[in-house]
Image: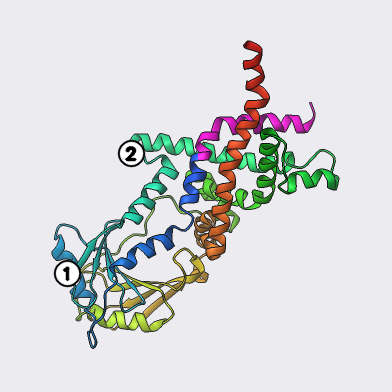
Amino acid sequence: MPFRKLLYWPHLICGVLAGVVILTMSVTGVLLTYEKQMVAWSERQFDVVPVAGAVALSPEELHASAIAADPSRPVARLIYRNDPAAAVVAVRGRSDKLYLDPYTGRLIAEGPTAMQAFMQWTTQFHRWFALEGTSRDTARMVTGAANLMFLFLAVSGIYLWFPPVLRWVNIRKVLFFKKNANAHARDFNWHHVMGIWSVVPLVVITATAAVFYYDWANDLVYRLAGDEAPARGERSPVPAPAAETSARLGLSMLFTTAATYRQDWNSLTLAWPKPGDRQVTFTFDWGMGGEPAKKGDLVIDRTSGAVIEWVAFEDKTPGSQARTMVRFLHTGEALGVIGQTIAGIVSLFSAIMVWTGIALAWRKYVAPLRRKRA
């Protein structure tokens, strides 16, 4: 059997078996293209109009306002935007938000916003069809397997998309869109053209997605970077709090130190310290939220106010850098808005390729059988 035909049949079978799941992941991927920008835009509705001469409240006062709204829910962090009109966001749990007036502590709204809730649900549907409990594990197995099939489709497509005779007149037919006489010719042309132009980013998107589903793929990233992969779910041991030997500085002073340490930040996150913590960590983001090279952590001593450590992306281990980059290469955010746009276009092309591929298979194999039976 010729190699082309030997590769064609697994390509076809994987496309048919995983087509619906791949279509679902592709469509939701399109919806998530500009997730961070859309969420940030939706939060602009909570901006305030600063009164002349108004002084922003301290982190302690804003924390107290958030606790007063619901004493049973501890605040994990405060998020500041580098804009005097921006509301301060108090985050409870993973994504439950309170939007506070930075000058009065007034509760403006309780989130997430409708846009953020929609994006969260879309992300869950993208990953595991938004199922819960044990069904989520089953769904993750399905989407993980479908993603591996999608990776195989992209790699095998590199060979299958090229014509058997490599002449320009043949290559041009699968490289550019053209006017077609019928639906079959149109689907054939679209399937090949979209595939050949999106194959490189598609391989990146599907290969990086495998890291989220499989331990072996996650470990491979660290090994390729020359590091040992940490056990999933493993956390650094938390030291017992030391006995109080001196007074702690107010968080307002520490926040001022952090805010002036690097003044080009777009958002600054204060991880709310526990009573026994001797350090406070501030996370800087001077990008659009998904660029790992534009983030850094500043650790400040609560007693002296001295900067203990500054950890930027380039200061992390090669394995940690690679694993972080994989996360944001999957969405294209590592390359900024251009990367997001490419990922969104490729997701759209993927949805169309699934549709045209199934349509071609239907016309070639199912329709003749139905006609023969009739």
Q: Which quadrant would residue 266 be assigned to in this image?
A: bottom left
Range of magenta residues: 1-23
Q: Which quadrant would residue 295 be assigned to in this image?
A: bottom left
Between marks 2 and 1, how big is the CA–CA gap? 33 Å
Coordinates of residue 161 in the picture (x, y in percent): 73, 41
Cβ–Cβ below 8 Å for labels 2 and 1? Answer: no
Image disc number at residue 65: 1
- Figure check: 146 above or below 248: above
Coordinates of residue 311 in the picture (x, y in percent): 44, 72
Image disc number at residue 132: 2
Q: Secondary structure at mark 2?
A: loop
Q: Is residue 241 visible?
A: no
Q: Is residue 258 left or right of residue 106?
A: right
Image disc number at residue 51: none
The verdict on residue 18 being magenta is yes
**Amino acid on which the number 2 mark rests in the picture:** Glu
Q: Is residue 191 left or right of residue 121?
A: right
Q: Which quadrant: the C terminus?
A: top right
The residue lying furthest to the top in this view is 373
Q: Is residue 286 visible?
A: yes
Coordinates of residue 179 in the picture (x, y in percent): 72, 43
Q: Secondary structure at mark 1?
A: helix
Q: Earlier in the sequence, mark 2 or mark 1?
A: 1
Q: Which secondary structure is most common in the magenta stretch? A: helix
- Along the line of sight, the residue nearer the viewer: 92 or 339: 339
